[in-house]
Image: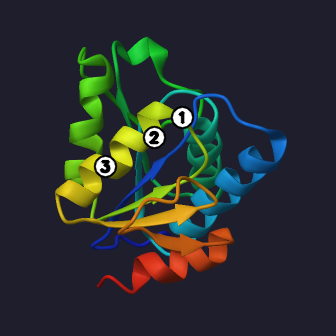
Amino acid sequence: MRWRISEMQIAVVGGGDCSLEVHEMARRLGRLLAEQGHVLLCGGLGGVMEAACCGARDAGGISVGILPGDKEEANRCVGIAIATGMNHARNVIIVRSADVVIALPGMHGTLSEIALALKMGKRVISLQSWEVPGTVRAETPEDAVKLAGAVI
C-alpha cells in the first residue's frame, strides 16, 4: 500500500495500561488511521499509546510520540519521538497539535486530555472512554475514524 499524507493529525489518548480488548481496539484504530493517511499523535508510552503506534506502523503510517521525559521512554513502535521533559503538561501539546482527539479507556491523564481538547474547541470522539458532555460517542474503531473524517 502506498502511504499518503493527510491534512489530519489525530491524537489517540488512553491509558498507559490497558486490557487485551482495549489493546486490540487501539491497534486496530492506529491501523485504520494510517490507512486513511492520517498522522497519529499520542503520549508515546505503553498501553493504548503503544498499541495505536504499532497499528499505524503495521500499515506504513506515521506516529508521533510526545513524551513526558526523554526519547528513551518511547514505546517500540513510535515513529517520531518528541522529548518534552514536561511530564503531564505535555498533554497540552498533544491536544493543541491535533485536529481531532480520539479517547480510549484511561484514567485521569486521559480525562485531562479530553477536558483540554474540549476547552480548545476540538472535536473529541470517545471510543468506549469517559462520557463527558461535548464528546461524540463511537462504539468501534471504524466508527471513530468515520467521525474523525467528518471534521474536514
Identify the secondary structure beneath mark 3: helix
The residue where tag 2 is placed is: 110
Residue drawn 82% across and 41% down? 20
Question: Label 2: how many residues lie within 10 Å, few (<14), some (14-19) or many (20+)?
Answer: many
Q: Amino acid at mark 1?
A: Met
Residue under numbered circle 1: 107
Is the residue under label 1 in contact with that under label 2 (CB below 8 Å)? yes
Q: Which circle marks residue 115 in the picture?
A: 3
Tell me: 90 left or right of 29.
left
Q: How many residues crowd mark 1 within 10 Å: few (<14), some (14–19), many (20+)?
A: some
- Viewport quadrant of the N terminus: bottom right
Q: Residue 65, percent across and down?
A: 40, 36
Reading the chain from its start, which is encountered first: label 3 or label 1? 1
Front one among 59 and 88: 88
Residue 75: x %, y % from top left: 55, 26
Measured in 3D between alpha carbons, the distance from the residue under mark 3 to the one under mark 2, in whole angstroms, is: 9 Å
Could you tell me how far apart the alpha carbons at marks 2 and 1 are, in whole angstroms? Answer: 6 Å
Q: Secondary structure at mark 2?
A: helix
* Image quadrant where residue 10 sits: bottom left
Disc 3 from disc 1: Cα separation: 13 Å
Q: Earlier in the sequence, mark 3 or mark 2?
A: 2
